[in-house]
């Protein structure tokens, strides 16, 4: 009973703090907005694509959490493996040393393992740096991440031919 009283009584001060800290219009709003805009990191235009196998969810029943882990594994692995690649360095540092603030990623899907392997083979043949994440101990591919890029036409064609689409 005392815990209910304590939580009930703690609500009022929190609500008053929230309402007292809400912004009010003032004549300096545009100046502070402009200053904030000038202080923002500059986007590089680079995007890291992460491709996941849809069949892991639809056929094998993988939950969303493990799928998110596969995407994170692939992204971390490609970042580590290609740490010295010029586009990876630019993606991380940006034009102004703050690239990590404006990173862009696109999460895509392919239907199944065969499509992921086909995509990897095409990327390899085209010399496009990427990493295929292998889930262990099962040792099967679950995700693929590309070095950040500006999605050149050749890459777009490879992604389209491999059945890639936005993860939904």
Image (cartoon, helix red, strand yellow):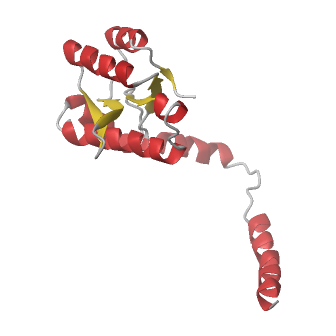
| Towards the viewer: 110 or 100 | 110
| Towards the viewer: 70 or 11 | 70
The number of callouts visible is 0
Would you identify the image quadrant in which residue 58 lies?
top right
- On the picture, is 129 further left or further right than 45? left
Q: Quadrant of the N terminus?
A: bottom right
Q: Measuring 75% from the left and 66% from the top, which residue is drawn there?
A: 18
Q: Measuring 40% from the left and 39% from the top, which residue is drawn there?
A: 71
Q: Measuring 77% from the left and 81% from the top, which residue is drawn there?
A: 7
Image vertical order of residue 109 relative to residue 70, above or below: above
Q: Residue furthest bottom?
A: 2
* Location of residue 11 in the rendering, given as x and y in whole percent from the top left corner: 79, 75
Q: Residue furthest left?
A: 84
Q: In this view of the protein, can residue 151 be seen by the observer?
A: yes
* Location of residue 114 in the rendering, given as x and y in whole percent from the top left corner: 35, 20
Q: Quadrant of the C terminus?
A: top right
- On the picture, is 67 further left or further right than 86? right
Q: In this view of the protein, can residue 150 be seen by the observer?
A: no
* Location of residue 25 in the rendering, given as x and y in whole percent from the top left corner: 76, 50
| Towards the viewer: 36 or 122 | 122
Would you identify the image quadrant in which residue 98 lies?
top left
Q: Measuring 39% from the left and 41% from the top, which residue is drawn there?
A: 70
* Location of residue 101 in the rendering, given as x and y in whole percent from the top left corner: 42, 44
Image vertical order of residue 140 relative to residue 19, above or below: above
Image vertical order of residue 68 relative to residue 85, above or below: below
């Amino acid at each position: 009973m005392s815990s209910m009283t304590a939580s009930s009584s703690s609500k009022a001060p929190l609500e008053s703090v929230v309402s007292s800290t809400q912004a009010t219009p003032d004549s300096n709003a545009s100046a502070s907005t402009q200053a904030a805009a000038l202080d923002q990191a500059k986007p590089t235009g680079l995007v890291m694509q992460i491709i996941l196998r849809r069949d892991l969810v639809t056929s094998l029943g993988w939950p969303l959490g493990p799928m998110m882990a596969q995407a994170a594994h692939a992204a971390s692995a490609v970042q580590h493996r290609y740490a010295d690649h010029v586009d990876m360095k630019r993606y991380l540092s940006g034009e102004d040393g703050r690239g990590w603030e404006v990173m862009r990623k696109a999460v895509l899907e392919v239907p199944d393992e065969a499509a992921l392997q086909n995509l990897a083979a095409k990327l390899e043949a085209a010399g496009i740096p990427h990493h295929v994440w292998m889930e262990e101990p099962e040792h099967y591919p679950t995700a693929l991440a590309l070095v950040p890029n500006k999605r050149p036409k050749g890459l777009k064609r490879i992604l389209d031919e491999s059945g890639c689409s936005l993860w939904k």
